[in-house]
Amino acid sequence: MSTVDDITALILDDHASFRRGFARLDDARDEQELLAIWDALALHLDIHAEAEEAILYPHLVKHGDDGEDETTDAIGDHNKIRDAIAEAKLHPVGSKPWWDAVGTARRENSEHLAEEEDEALPDFRRHASTELRAELGQRWLTFYGEHKAGRNLSFHDKDPQQYVADHR
Ligand SMILES: [Fe+2]
Ligand SMILES: [Fe+2]
């Protein structure tokens, strides 16, 4: 298995790009730059959460040592990030309420990445074979290809308990 095909490596790549995206907002010089950086970052955050909910968590919830709790937490975190992104869209870019919402998205995302990287992904690695990691990695890439620019995705919150009940 090349590491490129491993779903956990693909997820970590996305996480690194989220951190870079938030950092780039700090360096933006005007509202046009802010908008360009934020639009791309927000879309990527939303697609990433959908991809994990379609591909990673259905496996983790069934096979993880602590899969149900980790999945409940993750869906709840994804909802908070989605809500903050939706809130930011209601305000002029660069305004105080926009920065507040973006700050919330950043904080919630940072907390969530740490939990995912320190708890959910290690649990997944303990139970997923090399073949499965590669297979899900392939599905991950296909998902991104099929949903370029968020095509055919609606970024709506999911009830964490219901999600677990539907997938366990
Ligand atoms: Fe993630
Ligand atoms: Fe996540």
Image (spheres, rainbow, N blue to C red):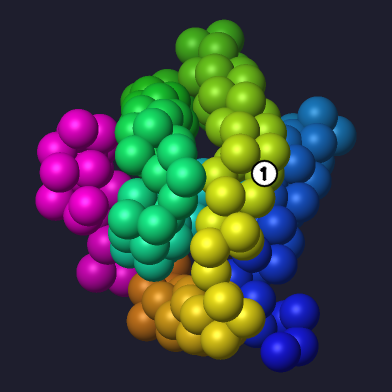
Relative to the observer, which residue lies in front, 32 or 40? Answer: 40
Question: Is 155 a magenta residue?
Answer: yes
Q: Is residue 114 left or right of residue 134?
A: right
Residue 91 appears in view:
yes
Residue at 23% over, 43% down:
164
Mark 1: give few (<14), some (14-19) or many (20+) Cα within 10 Å. some
Q: Quadrant of residue 26?
A: top right
Where is residue 126 drawn, in percent x and y? 61, 59
Q: Which residue is mark 1?
A: 117
Question: Which residues are the magenta region?
Answer: 150-168
Residue at 47% over, 45% down:
65
Where is residue 59 drawn, in percent x and y? 38, 62
Residue at 39% over, 32% down:
69
Residue at 71% over, 89% down:
1
- Position of residue 59 relative to residue 160, above or below, is below
Relative to the observer, which residue lies in front, 144 or 22? Answer: 144
